[in-house]
Amino acid sequence: MTGVSIYTMNQETKICQNCKNQFVIEPEDFLFYDKMKVPPPTWCPECRMVRRMTWRNESALYRRQCGLCKKSIITIYAKESPFTVYCRECWISDQWDARSYGKEYDWSTNFFTQFRKCMESVPLVLVDSKGTMIDSEYGNYNANCKNCYLCFSTALSEDSLYCSYSQDLKQCLDSTRLRGGELCYEAIDSEKDYSCAFINRTRESVDSSFLFECSGVTNCFMSANVRHKSYVFRERYLSVEDYRSEIKNIDLGSFRQVQNLEEEFTKLKASVLHKYTEIKNSVKATGNNITNSKQVQYSFDVIDSEDVKYSIRVFKGCRDIYDCHGVLSGELVYEGFGCGILPRNNLFSFSIDVSRDLAYCAMCRDCVSCFGCVGLRNKQYCILNQQYTKEAYEELVPKIIQHMNDMPYTDKKGRVYQYGEFFPPELSPFSYNETIAQEYFPLTQEQALEKGYRWKNPETKNYNIQIPNNKLPDNIKDVQDDIINQIIECAHQGQCTEQCTTAFKIINQELAFYRQMNLPLPRLCPNCRHYQRLKQRNPLKLWHRSCQCSGEKSSNGVYQNTVSHSHGNNPCPTEFETSYAPERPEIVYCEQCYQAEVV
């Protein structure tokens, strides 16, 4: 891909075109931009992240008709949107060719406006899920799922409901970033757990509940930082008989009791040690939830990858990835999301699979050397879906890049988009509150509009509430079978910024799970429950801080150290980058001080 050569390799401080704050471009960043033949960014890393997120609708679903076979489908595109949507069978069929919608490049208008028109003309696939999906149509960004309902960004899972950013699940409900779990409920940032509920950062644990940062435990309750122990009750190590006697008084089937336990759990987490970050077997890494990786900077949820920066959810052998969200086994990818499997040398693109040398493309599969294309499969040398020869393509692309610089797109807030910028948010198919931008950077309607984003007012709901929220049985043992498919009022009643649906139903599979696990009926709709879990995760942001170990105790005096540390009675001198904001109540230790206390 032809672009602009970067000659200066010194650190440079710039003013973000969007938020007007300063940000720094490091020498290694310039090396990457030079390798990708793109100009340096004009937006700061966080604003670039939000801009990409405004194009990613993961969980707002709508019912409409397939534009070809006319059957009813569930899709991420609202009925009133100006897009034609096909069901998966029609979209992958040979009944149409995306190149038939191709247009020659119009030199009288800017590129981004032409791309938006291309999106409006080419049929889009209903959701961005991959692989074999069996009885799992209510979801998005999923892969190889069976009997999953309202799961999003979830893979290789079955018989699970209301989960997100997860994989390898079996009979799990209401969990976020759970990797390998069975019979788990309200599990967050956890891995390989069985029959557990209300757990956070817990691994390889069994028959336990209300755990924080525990590993390899069995039959434990309301505890934190426990390793390979059994029968721990409220931080106390008990005999089997004493544990069973105590646990008999805990009834997780009661909603009122669970509410009290959640408050107790919140206080527990504020009083115990927190390791500054979750980085394992990694070298030169900053961010959170990074495993088996090296040279990863300011990134989150990265596994088995190297040379990654400003990215989220990067997995399995990725290399040279900047400003991306969702890449699997890719290399040389910049400013994209849903980059899929095996992308290589792709720029400013989204929902791409097994493709290389693409720029400003969307929903393309098995494509090579395409620019500004939508919905192509097994094609090459296309521009705005128009087919060209290799020679004509290579001659035309540099001229388009120059045209993008000479005739940029300017949005309603005066932000200028030349070659090197991701797609403008105001051209996104989705409003701000339909996208994951609202999940990670929530705004009110007034705030979103002031920042130049669109906002979707909730659709008019003609629900006939059959069960007011305060009339639900407190205990699961008192719930009758006729609760199935009755319309239940959400406790938020739409008075929140969490995509509240105002009402919800309990389905058969869900009720059976609550009874099996002895858990109460939820009081919030699935969207609001998802937002409550997100609030328990650390943000996608880093702060420079110092270790709070002051020698014999934590600097706030809450935690008393149990052993002597290498720095003695003096405050620990270690500084680090952490996703714990300074104003938060948690006690944050560096890895050395944390390991001295916990392991």
Image: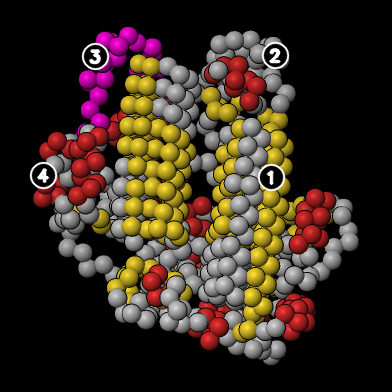
Q: Give me the residue at 76% from left, 65% from top.
A: 38
Of residues 286 and 369, the one nearer the viewer is 369
Image quarter for residue 53?
bottom right
Q: Where 40 sits versus 79, above or below?
A: above
Give residue 480's mark. Answer: 4
Q: Is residue 292 visible?
A: yes
Identified by mark 3, the residue type is Ser
Q: Secondary structure at mark 1?
A: strand
Q: Residue 416, position in %: x, y? A: 69, 73
Image quadrant assignment for residue 371: bottom right
Q: Which mark is residue 245?
A: 3
* Residue occupying the point 48% across, 22% down: 225
Marked residue nearer the N-terminal end (4 or 2): 4
- Label 3 sits on a secondary structure element that is helix
Q: Earlier in the sequence, mark 4 or mark 3?
A: 3
Segment tinted magenta in the rendering: 232-254
Kindly tell me whether residue 83 is visible in this rendering: no
Q: Residue at (33%, 57%) from the top-left corner?
A: 134
- Label 4 SS: loop
Q: How is the image coloured?
A: secondary structure
Q: What residue did someone put label 2 on? A: 566
Q: CA distance from mark 2 to mark 1?
A: 32 Å
Q: CA distance from mark 4 to mark 1?
A: 53 Å
